[in-house]
Amino acid sequence: MKVAIIGDGLSAVACAAFLARRRVDLIWIQGTGSRMVYPISSISRGDAFTFLNRLASEFELDVGEETQGLFIREARNKAFRNPPWAETFDPDLRQSTIDESVTSGESRLIPLFESRFEDLEIREIEDALRARVLEMPWVKRLEGIPLLKVTGDQSYELVLGNSADPVKVDALVYCDRLLGIKAIEGMPGLISGTHLHEIGRKTKPCSVLQYLLKHRSPIASDMKESFCVPLQRESDEKEQKNIWGSFSKNGMESVWTLFLDADETEDNHVIVKRLRRMRQALNKAFSAEFISSSENHQAPTGEPRSVDFTALIQQEQVRFEENFITTRGEVLSISQSRLAVLTDAFGAGAALQAVEQWTHFLAGILETKHESLDLFGPSSDIEPPL
């Protein structure tokens, strides 16, 4: 059996890891390359966490034990405190408090109830799984080649940008940007009989601006929490926007994320201004006093111990993903044995949960030499692709 995965985000990595570990002949097409570096340290408790933990275990990643709790801290009045939704454990009341407290795009990021791994961040696990999968000889990776057309029903032919011959596969898993489906000839027809055919009407996209940093010395290396930092409002803004992020690699790296509405992405000057506001907000939240009081903080040689956040930036990278997250509507996905649409558009927790549910559809079509193969257990003795 040959399976094609389209996409490069967390859902694509999870699908690829599950299939590759079971030695399925896999073609992994980068597609648009759109992905969000997961900015916070926790993820939804339950199926999403359990599935990611199982993948990490199958690839022998040392992620540590599960820790449950409240890991998001809100910056207010020169201090960090629990967010408003932490005051209740009633699921409905907590979700409504989240919806009232943050923008609709930000709400896709926040786990209702949080779990985290003790030793690795979610983004570090994603990177490790990606690297392990790409080492496997039965996985073929295609980058920088657009998918132009899809035809077929129970099996599929994929027309790629620079190839005269279509790629034939037995199953197709689309994990790229949700709105990108309409740009691929044949894909709208494949989903026409499903609830995904009205994507544009039922969903509203927002974009993601990410600020990835490497630091000259550790910051908050003793902290396992994630942070919500308010962005200074513009005069005409009605909603309070927030920056979401966390530190990793023992405080030597951090990732910060801002969600942008459609009207903010039409002008590059607005995006640059938002980035400048992000730097100012982070510098204010992580003051010299905060940094100097952090356990294990050591100022760079020749500099005073008390130094502000931006002074400790050694390397920075800016990522912008247009129309990446949906800000309204129910979670939309397709889980069929030979066709699946599983994207990151509804948040990481929803993506992992959708992938986990989809894996149960595979039991009837994954052909192996082991009739008693447990698709959801150990797989070290699985034969190479047929």
Image: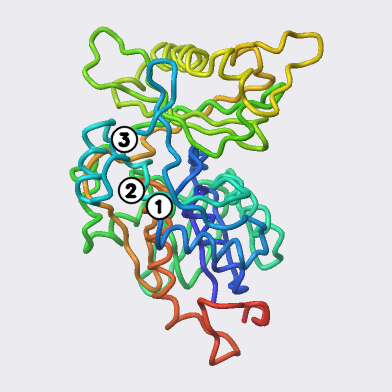
Label 3 vs label 1: CA separation? 16 Å
* Quadrant where the C terminus is found in the figure: bottom right
Q: Image point 31% across, 35% down: which residue?
A: 105
Kindly identify the residue that appears in the image at 38 percent across and 16 percent down: 77
Instruction: Give the residue type at disc 3.
Output: Gly
| Mark 2 element type | loop
Furthest-right residue in this view: 301
What's the amino acid at mark 1? Ser
In what element is the residue under mark 1?
Answer: strand
Q: Secondary structure at mark 3?
A: helix
Q: Earlier in the sequence, mark 1 or mark 2?
A: 1
Q: Nearer the viewer, residue 239 or 358?
A: 239
Q: Quadrant of residue 297?
A: top right
Q: Quadrant of residue 53?
A: bottom right
Residue 140 left/right relative to 342: right
User: Which of 238 and 383 lies nearest the eye of the viewer?
Assistant: 238
Residue at which label 3 appears: 105
Give coordinates of residue 193: x percent, y percent. 21, 64
Q: CA distance from mark 1 to mark 2?
A: 6 Å
Residue 112's disc number: 2
The disc placed on residue 44 is 1
| Residue 357 x/y as whole percent | 38, 68
| First along the sequence among labels 3 and 2 | 3
Q: CA distance from mark 3 to mark 2?
A: 15 Å
In the figure, 181 relative to 258: above or below?
A: below
Point 36% across, 45% down: residue:
345
Left or right: 115, with 23 as reference point: left
Q: Residues within 10 Å of mark 1 (few under 14, many from 20)?
A: many
In the rendered structure, which amino acid carries the disc numbered 2?
Leu
Quadrant holding the N terminus: bottom right
- Residue 60 circle label: none
Dots 3 and 1: beta carbons under 8 Å? no
